[in-house]
Image (cartoon, rainbow, N blue to C red):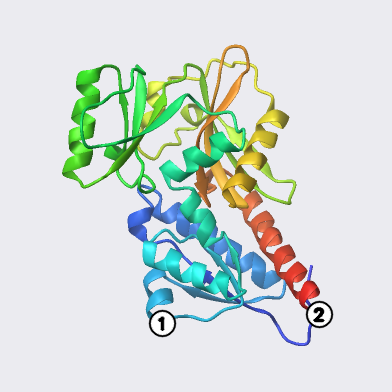
């Protein structure tokens, strides 16, 4: 696949993820980003790569951008470029949609199967009667283990809320704990790529929280249904390059418990990178053809 129909190579800017936003996955995030850039170059693009801070400080101008950004200043800059007509994958607006509070609201509003959930301010007592449950910071992506906590009683919940207040986290998302097999998945919108696996079987973990659900029991998993749910979520959140987690019940019921913009694809990097590049490339071509 080449871009020989165009007189000059198309300039594409890539924005990497700051290390502070890659807890325990710095090397994996860097690897999928670099490999995607290489695949775009094979397709005929000329790719310039920037760390998040440099991209913002230099006020980089670009018509086509792919990114793994998370820093607020970078996301603001990406939105500015989008508003001016640039193509950005993943969109700055999509990245913001994956912040826990907004993500929960959008998944529920768009009919994506999801745990029973509520959004509460961290000021005051813990009102929900949902135990056991997960308490998650609502104002950003999880950056440290303490941002996502499993609790079994009100006393534990109050301790988490106190910690959130101490760290100036204003809002929390509460999800009921689901019993079942934990499954991680990765996908790329508009391609035939979808990959799912049991993280406990492959020792794949960011914070070790998978241990709460325990070893997979082999409950019936309909991969086609999971793919449909994941695709629905990716469109609702506007993140074509995505990953997430779901829990599968003993009856085979699937509910998505988390969704991420551009994860590390660590277990399937070689298969994923060409598909991510294909997604970006096809969107570039579509935009160019529309502009003719």
In the image: residue 231, left or right of residue 126: right
State the quadrant of the N terminus.
bottom right
State the quadrant of the C terminus.
bottom right
Against 29, residue 256 (above or below) is: above
Q: Which residue is mark 2?
A: 292
The residue lying toward the viewer, choosing from 54 and 56, is 56
Sequence-first tag of 2 and 1: 1
Badge 1: residue crowd in 10 Å (few <14, some 14–19, many ≥20): few
Q: Residue furthest right?
A: 5
Q: Residue at x 64, y 47 (%)?
A: 235
> At which x and y percent is residue 194?
67, 41
Secondary structure type for disc 1: loop
Q: Which residue is mark 1?
A: 58
In the image: residue 234, left or right of residue 146: right
Q: Residue at x 54, y 47 (%)?
A: 265
Between tags 2 and 1, which lies in front? 2
Q: Quadrant of residue 57?
A: bottom left
The residue lying toward the viewer, choosing from 149 and 198, is 149
Against 253, residue 168 (above or below) is: below
Q: Residue furthest bottom?
A: 7
Q: Residue at x 51, y 17 (%)?
A: 180
Secondary structure type for disc 2: loop
Badge 2: residue crowd in 10 Å (few <14, some 14–19, many ≥20): few
> At which x and y percent is residue 187?
63, 45
CB under 8 Å between callouts 2 and 1?
no
The Cα atoms of the two marked residues, 2 and 1, are separated by 30 Å
| Residue 47: mark in rendering | none
In the image: residue 121, left or right of residue 106: left
Q: Residue at x 73, y 51 (%)?
A: 190
> At which x and y percent is residue 70?
42, 58
């Amino acid at each position: 696949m080449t871009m020989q129909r165009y007189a000059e190579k198309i300039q594409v800017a890539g924005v990497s993820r700051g290390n502070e936003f890659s807890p325990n996955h710095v090397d994996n995030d860097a690897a999928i980003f670099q490999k995607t850039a290489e695949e775009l170059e094979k397709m005929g693009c000329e790719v310039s790569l920037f760390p998040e801070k440099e991209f913002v400080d230099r006020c980089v101008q670009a018509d086509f951008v792919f990114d793994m950004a998370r820093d607020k200043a970078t996301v603001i800059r990406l939105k500015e470029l989008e508003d001016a007509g640039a193509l950005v994958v993943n969109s700055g607006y999509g990245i913001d949609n994956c912040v826990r509070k907004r993500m929960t609201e959008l998944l529920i509003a768009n009919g994506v199967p999801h745990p029973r959930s509520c959004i509460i301010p961290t000021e005051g007592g813990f009102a929900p009667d949902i135990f056991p449950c997960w308490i998650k910071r609502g104002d950003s992506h999880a950056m440290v283990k303490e941002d996502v906590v499993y609790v079994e009683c009100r006393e534990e919940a109050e301790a988490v809320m106190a910690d959130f207040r101490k760290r100036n986290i204003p809002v929390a998302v509460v999800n009921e704990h689901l019993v079942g097999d934990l499954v991680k998945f990765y996908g790329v919108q508009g391609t035939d790529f979808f990959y799912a696996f049991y993280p406990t079987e492959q020792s794949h973990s960011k914070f070790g929280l998978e241990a709460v659900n325990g070893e997979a029991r082999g409950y019936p998993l309909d991969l086609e249904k999971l793919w449909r749910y994941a695709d629905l979520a990716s469109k609702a959140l506007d993140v074509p390059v995505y990953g997430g987690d779901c829990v599968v019940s003993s009856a085979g019921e699937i509910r998505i418990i988390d969704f991420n913009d551009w994860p590390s694809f660590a277990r399937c990097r070689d298969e994923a990178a060409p598909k991510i590049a294909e997604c970006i490339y096809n969107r570039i071509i579509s935009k160019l053809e529309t502009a003719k």
